[in-house]
Image (cartoon, grey):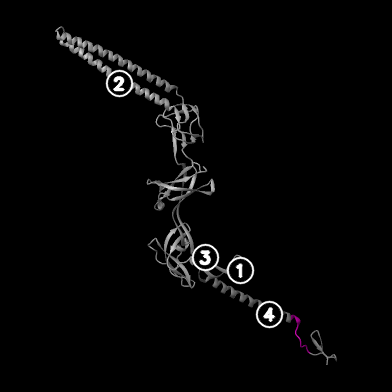
Amino acid sequence: MHIVARRGILRRPNGASQSPVSQDPFDELHARRSRRWIVVVVVLAIIAAGAVVYARRRRAPTGPRYLTASVGRGEIVASVETSGSLQPDVQVQVGSQVSGRMARVLVDFNARVTRGQLLAEIDSTPFRAAVAQARAAVLSAQAQLQRAQVNVRIAETNLARATDLRSRGLNAIADVDSTRGARDLSLADVAAARAEIARARASLSSAETNLTFTRITAPIDGVVIQRSIDEGQTVAASFQAPTLFLIAADLTRMRIVANVDEADVAQMREHLMATARVDAFPGETFRGELVELRYGSQTTSGVVTYPAVISVANPEMKLRPGMTATVTVVAARHPEVLFVPNAALRFRPTAATPDGGAPAPAAESDPHRGTLYVLRASRPVAVPVTLGLHDDRRTEVSGPGLAAGMQVVTDEIEQRASTTGSGGAPGMGGRRR
């Protein structure tokens, strides 16, 4: 028997209609849509539950993560760095002791001069006149002496005649006394004339000396590094000698006057080796030696410093006076020792960590003792060590169990279970302590 379905009505072959037995298509479509909504709601609920779990896990820390560094072996150099200005090892200021107009200037900057060489000359006309006047005064004083000596001879003759007459009773005793007094006055005039001669000769010597001072000569062999006078300029030397030239004896040896902080003075001593750097030659160092550490202090803005003199070799004459130099003085040098980064000695673990990190030890009272931390079973364990030399980055250490290559803790990071970066990808996150 064949059954034909049309418009939801079953018909039999003989055409007799029966009651409907199938569902309307619109009802079936509505049922499908309902099932889809149920699936969407379930998926959203699962996503929301996962987000809640993710947020809780992100907020919950899982303990710190430790950063480590290796114990190294090599050379440790303790040094003190300071700065100062370059100066010639020996330099002389050449001035003038007399005033006057500068008649000639014979040398200029960078001129090489020898001892006794004429550098400049002041107009000598008034000084020559002063010399002539002083010589005339000497001649006048000598003439006065001769006159006084003649008067002495006359007075002695008169005294002898008066004495002879007195012996024969031909004159009074007062005449003898008068002639004796005249003789004594003549002798005093002779002494005064001699003194006047001495004074006149001294004035002549002073005038001649001032005349020689008009010639400015080099006191040493060297190089003129400064000239402060021109021809025709007037030199005034009323209260102090003005500086006309500055001569450096030897520019192949320079010195640096540096200021050493009071905290570093204990490491400094004479004859320590040093190196100097200048901005003009950034890739080159100049060798030197600490030759003097002065006791006199200087206070600038409340900072106490002590001058240190470093002698530097300058065979190629690259260094020039006035340059600012950065000086490194080597205080001590230890080769082939164990060292760690300074951060490893400053590190102290937190007092309480989720994984049972070790608490920080009490502060060491001995400056030569320190504490390092090594990881054992993912926990930092304190290891006492003895400290040695140190520089800006590393410190010499020694102690039982230390070996090159050992890992020591330098820092810790507060680690969380997961985090979302800027790109939305989960990963490890944390905050450095």
Q: Mark 3 to mark 4: distance in Å?
A: 47 Å
Q: Amino acid at mark 2?
A: Ala
Q: Earlier in the sequence, mark 2 or mark 1?
A: 2
Decide: few, some or many residues near mark 4? Use Cα within 10 Å; few <14, some 14-19, many ≥20: few
Which residue sits at x=40%, y=24%? Answer: 208
Q: Which mark is residue 195?
A: 2
Q: Residue at the location (45% across, 29% down)?
A: 216
The Cα atoms of the two marked residues, 2 and 1, are separated by 112 Å
Q: CA distance from mark 3 to mark 1?
A: 18 Å
Residue occupying the far left of the picture: 169
Is 22 in the magenta?
yes
Mark sitting earlier along the chain (3/1): 1
Q: Nearer the viewer, residue 242 or 429?
A: 242
Q: Which residue is mark 4?
A: 35
| Mark 3 residue element | strand
Q: Which is in the foreground here, disc 3 or disc 2?
A: 2
- In this picture, which residue range is highlighted in magenta? 19-26
Mark 1 or mark 4: name the one nearer the start of the chain.
Answer: 4
Tag 4 secondary structure: helix
Numbered disc in front, either 2 or 1: 2
Q: Disc 1 marks which amino acid?
A: Ala
Queried whether the magenta region covers residue 211, the answer comes back as no
Q: Are marks 1 and 4 in contact (CB under 8 Å)?
A: no
In the picture of the structure, the residue carrying the numbered disc 3 is 431
Q: Residue at x 27, y 19 (%)?
A: 191
Mark 2–mark 1 CB contact (< 8 Å) = no
Q: Would residue 289 appear left or right of 426 to someone viewing this image?
A: left
Residue 163 position within the rendered picture, expressed as x and y whole percent measured from the top left: 17, 11
Any mark on residue 425, and which?
1
Q: Amino acid at mark 4?
A: Arg
